[in-house]
Image: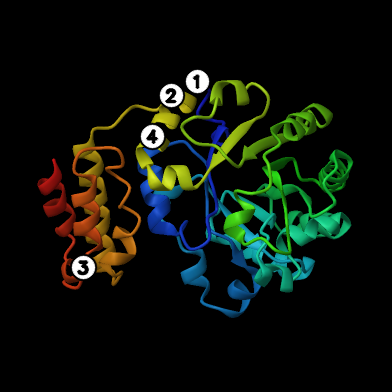
Amino acid sequence: MSKAFEDPHRLCTAPMLDWSDRHCRFVFRIFAPHAMLYTEMVTTGAIIHGDQRRHLDFSEEEHPLALQLGGSAPEELQHCAMLASSWGYDEINLNCGCPSERVQKGNFGASLMFEHKLVAQCVQSMRDATNIPITVKHRLGVDDSDSYDFVSQFVGTVRDAGCKTFIVHARIAVLKGLSPKKNREVPPLNYEFVYRLKQEYPDCAFIINGGLDEHAEFESILEKVNGVMIGRAIYHSPEFLGKLSQSIHGSTPQSLDNIILRIHEYVVNQVRNGVPLKSVTRHLLGLFHGRKGARMWRRILSDPDHLKDNDPDLIMRAYQEVC
């Protein structure tokens, strides 16, 4: 399954809202040196009217890195694309898959699949603003619009606007009656539609997302599409991400000692710059998943009494307790 390092989309980390912040992405980068990392979704309004540094800053180690945008106004997306380009992002991804009610009220996310011509305009506006790739993440359909023709028409229209990479969550989105969590679990997976899209549009790259965990047949999947995107399975077990990186990109395994030392160094720098220790440790709780001492590790790094001192050496003390 080995693939050249120049193809980061073979392995992608998902844009998980409230999880995929810069500290989470740093941990992912340690385990997957060549994967494509995605930010959590950031709305155009938050970037235009909010704290741009808070929303856009990242560490140089995170490259290659894509910014996922939420929005539906071409002019606002164009402005944010210009900012993302100047900030140094490697890709801009438009969210056409989130089913939450808050996103629906903003007329973006999965509801945009009903407006493929508008999505095409958004893609074109962003392409006019920057030379970095514009990609789209979407579902297979929405509510009763779940036929192959529906998603194929969506992809074809957006492709004609210049999008060449599609990340497909291989489920439909149910906009009424299902929570975002249930929308990740209840609608059945349909990888066959994604494989069919790849056959119909061979000049485009398709990355498959949804239901991928340690039981997935990655070798078979990667024979049919260009890449895989994984979220919660690697968040809860970064070691699983490391194994995928070794298999897909041929990366070199790292010792746990080295991983902990790199994380400790990162935490020292972050705390020095005013970042609360708990902002980083919340992303470290899965490091010992499936190993002896996992419960002790989680207990120490989530204990408010330990965290209140904001001492980066808590990482090393916790490690000494479990190793």
What residue is shown with label 1?
A: 2
> Residue 149 at x, y = what percent?
89, 41
Instruction: Please tell me whether mark 4 sits on a helix, a strand or a loop.
Output: helix
Residue appearing at x 64%, y 49% in the figure: 186
Earlier in the chain: of badge 4 and badge 2, it is 4
Earlier in the chain: of badge 2 and badge 1, it is 1
Instruction: Please tell me whether mark 2 sits on a helix, a strand or a loop.
Output: loop
Earlier in the chain: of badge 3 and badge 4, it is 4
Q: From the viewer's side, name the closer residue of 94 and 82.
A: 94
Image depth: mark 4 or mark 1 in front:
4
What residue is shown with label 3?
A: 307
Earlier in the chain: of badge 3 and badge 1, it is 1
Q: Are marks 3 and 1 in contact (CB under 8 Å)?
A: no
**For the residue marked with disc 2, what is the amino acid?**
Gly
**For the residue marked with disc 4, what is the amino acid?**
Gly
Q: Mark 3 Cα within 10 Å, few/some/many (few <14, many 20+)?
A: some
Q: Mark 4 Cα within 10 Å, few/some/many (few <14, many 20+)?
A: many
Residue appearing at x 54%, y 48% in the figure: 14
- Which of the 4 quarters of the picture holds residue 119? bottom right
What residue is shown with label 2?
A: 250
Tell me how far mark 3 sits from mark 1, CA to CA. Answer: 41 Å
Q: Mark 1 Cα within 10 Å, few/some/many (few <14, many 20+)?
A: few
